[in-house]
């Protein structure tokens, strides 16, 4: 969680905000996010490779691009574990480096 928080601060916070609530209609919230809970693989893929195209989070459509962050698989796992267990999210299943390594573009 400590490593994931540091990565979040460095790479994610400027768009998704310190509280994980994002920017309405621009950057989706990570806090209490149904997308993160229901679309685990897609969420990992977005952190690992970036994301473009429309997604729906908590009933709101977003269509902003997220650039690939250039993180190693262990860093992706760390930040995902931080996000999936912060701001009202409770996943209970840790993201592993092996799981991240199997995600392809």
Image (cartoon, rainbow, N blue to C red):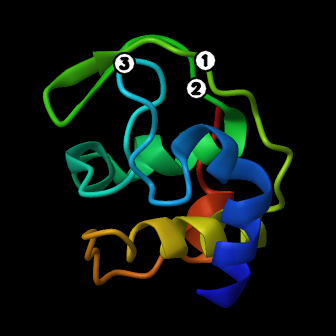
Q: Residue at x 28, y 74 (%)?
A: 91
Q: Which residue is mark 2?
A: 51
Counting residues from the start of the chain, the first of labels 1 and 3 encountered is 3
Q: Residue at x 79, y 42 (%)?
A: 69
Disc 3 from disc 2: Cα separation: 16 Å
Say which quadrant the C terminus sits in. top right
Q: Which residue is mark 1?
A: 65
Task: Name the disc covering residue 37, or none.
Answer: none
Residues at badges 3 and 2 in contact (C-beta under 8 Å)? no
Counting residues from the start of the chain, the first of labels 3 and 2 encountered is 3
With 42 as the anchor, is 35 left or right in this view? left
Residue 2 x/y as whole percent? 67, 88
Identify the secondary structure beneath mark 1.
loop
Up/down of 25 relative to 3, above or below:
above
With 87 as the anchor, is 101 left or right in this view? right
Residue at the bottom extreme of this rendering: 2
Q: Residue at x 65, y 75 (%)?
A: 5
Quadrant of residue 14 within the rendered picture: top right
Quadrant of residue 63 within the rendered picture: top left
Q: Which residue is mark 3?
A: 25
Identify the secondary structure beneath mark 2.
loop
């Amino acid at each position: 969680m400590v490593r994931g928080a540091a990565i979040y601060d460095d790479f994610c916070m400027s768009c998704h905000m310190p509280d994980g609530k994002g920017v309405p209609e621009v950057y989706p919230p990570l806090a209490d996010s149904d997308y993160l809970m229901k679309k685990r693989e897609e969420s990992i893929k977005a952190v690992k490779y970036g994301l473009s195209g429309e997604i729906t989070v908590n009933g709101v459509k977003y269509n902003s691009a997220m650039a690939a962050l250039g993180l190693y698989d262990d860093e992706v796992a760390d930040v995902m574990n931080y996000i999936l267990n912060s701001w009202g999210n409770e996943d209970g299943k840790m993201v592993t480096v092996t799981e991240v390594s199997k995600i392809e573009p």
